């Protein structure tokens, strides 16, 4: 009898290892596809399914000046050296330089991973203005029914937005099952909602996809309770169309399911530039206040536990030579030199996707590239600032 039980247990463990191995292989193959494809455009993104369309504005301008001025050569050379796919620079609201890898151009869509988090952060400003969300100090249980009587429901929205929820951290690098489910399964939101509390909220900074997923679930539920269609439609109406962006695609967990609020917004480099310009212009597009200026200031202000992080957006000041993601993530991003401007904020994708914004210089830089762990965050913005003669 014991021998039979051991045999069954052995088969069960073997099956689990096979499933985990397949999941790890799938994840790695997707990353490798992103990093080795010759075109690295729409063809790679076809592996991300299902998708919903975020319709762009009725009339948009997609023209970009495709040139690399000699005074900006250092910035463009560094981007290309580290497997850059696209880079665009805008100063005073005008595109002054752009560059694309062979086979790519202004119409190419890119998966830019965690840059979606900063879009989520912007939409919170619109939702508070529209009365969909009462405020960031509201307990998340006000919006997520499953947590209404759960201790997790008392965590304020602000702690999810600033990466300080205290929920247990599961590592993708270690192959921990909840982390694998969050990235690869069709139960992304269910997985996020199953994560237990590990420490008091507001006690430790931990950059964690679960935090963004929970913040996104709360926003999506609040939108639907208010009679709206949900997150994708709100993204389209409250942000994407008002800034004049073109069609984009949003990766959802399954047909009718939730988006990956921490990733999966596939858009053109030029449209990411428009998102960055919105921040540079204090939430305005022309005469229209798309996102409240007060929210732009609050979102980009330093959070209580990490002065280099606001709410779903990173900050360049105060300068640190190596930027940490949290106590459970060994990888740190190099920042070899201090930034040449104090108000730099940026979206951070996976190992090389960035939107850098300096409102004081009216400067926006979009850089998209293959995932690299040696990408130095300070080189491109400093080279552009010096090349344009914007140093004080």
Image (tube, helix red, strand yellow):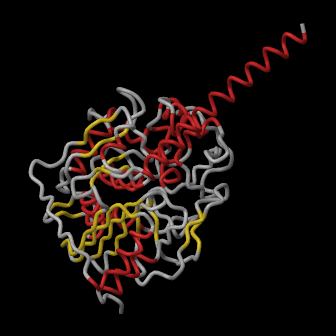
**378 left or right of 131 in image:** right
Rendered residue at 22%/58% (across/down)? 106
Can residue 299 be seen here? The reply is: no
Q: Quadrant of the C terminus?
A: bottom left
Can residue 385 be seen here? yes
Front-most of 174 and 198?
Answer: 174
Percent x, y for residue 61? 12, 59
Answer above or below: position of 11 versus 290.
above
Q: Which residue is at the far right?
A: 2
Q: Is residue 24 left or right of residue 184?
A: right
For the point 40% across and 70% down, the residue is 79
- Tell me residue 239's x, y (percent): 25, 51
Q: Between residues 365 and 97, which one lies in front from this camera angle? A: 97
Residue 326: quarter of image: bottom right
- Can you say whether 267 is above or below 282 in the image? above
| Image height of 253 relative to 321, above or below | above
Residue drawn at the location 45% of the way across and 81% of the way down: 339
Going 43% across and 81% down the picture, which residue do you hit?
342
Residue farthest toward the left in the current orientation of the protein: 59
Where residue 368 appears, as percent x and y from the top left, is 37, 61
Residue 5 screen position, x and y as percent:
84, 12
The residue nearer to you, when weighing 265 against 119, is 265
Q: Quadrant of the N terminus?
A: top right
């Amino acid at each position: 009898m014991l021998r039979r039980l051991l045999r069954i247990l052995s088969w069960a463990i073997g099956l689990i290892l096979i499933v985990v191995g397949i999941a790890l292989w799938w994840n790695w193959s997707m990353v490798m596809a992103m990093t080795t494809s010759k075109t690295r455009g729409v063809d790679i993104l076809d592996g991300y399914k299902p998708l919903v369309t975020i319709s762009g504005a009725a009339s948009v301008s997609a023209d970009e000046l495709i040139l690399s001025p000699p005074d900006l050569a250092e910035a463009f050379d560094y981007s290309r050296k580290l497997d850059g796919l696209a880079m665009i620079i805008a100063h005073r609201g005008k595109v002054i330089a752009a560059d694309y890898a062979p086979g790519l151009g202004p119409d190419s869509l890119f998966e830019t991973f965690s840059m979606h988090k900063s879009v989520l952060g912007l939409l919170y400003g619109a939702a508070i203005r529209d009365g969909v969300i009462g405020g960031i100090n509201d307990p998340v249980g006000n919006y997520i029914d499953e947590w209404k009587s759960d201790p997790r429901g008392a965590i304020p929205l602000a702690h999810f937005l600033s990466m300080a929820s205290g929920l247990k951290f599961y590592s993708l690098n270690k192959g921990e099952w909840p982390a694998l489910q969050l990235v690869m399964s069709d139960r992304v939101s269910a997985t996020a909602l199953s994560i237990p509390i590990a420490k008091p909220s507001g006690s430790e900074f931990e950059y964690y996809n679960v935090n963004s997923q929970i913040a996104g679930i709360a926003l999506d539920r609040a939108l639907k309770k208010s009679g709206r269609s949900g997150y994708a439609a709100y993204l389209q109406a409250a942000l994407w169309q008002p800034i004049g962006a073109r069609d984009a695609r949003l990766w959802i967990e399954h047909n009718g399911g939730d988006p990956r609020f921490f990733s999966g917004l596939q858009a053109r480099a030029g449209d990411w530039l428009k998102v960055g310009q919105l921040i540079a212009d204090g939430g305005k597009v022309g005469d229209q206040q798309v996102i409240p200026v007060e929210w732009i200031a609050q979102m980009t202000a330093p959070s209580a536990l990490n002065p280099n992080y606001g709410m779903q957006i990173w900050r360049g000041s105060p300068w640190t030579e190596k930027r940490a993601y949290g106590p459970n993530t060994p990888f740190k991003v190099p920042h070899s030199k201090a930034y040449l401007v104090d108000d730099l904020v940026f979206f951070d994708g996976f190992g090389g996707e960035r939107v850098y914004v300096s409102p004081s210089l009216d400067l926006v830089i979009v850089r998209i590239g293959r995932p690299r762990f040696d990408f130095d965050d300070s080189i491109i913005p400093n080279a552009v600032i010096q090349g344009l003669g914007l140093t004080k």
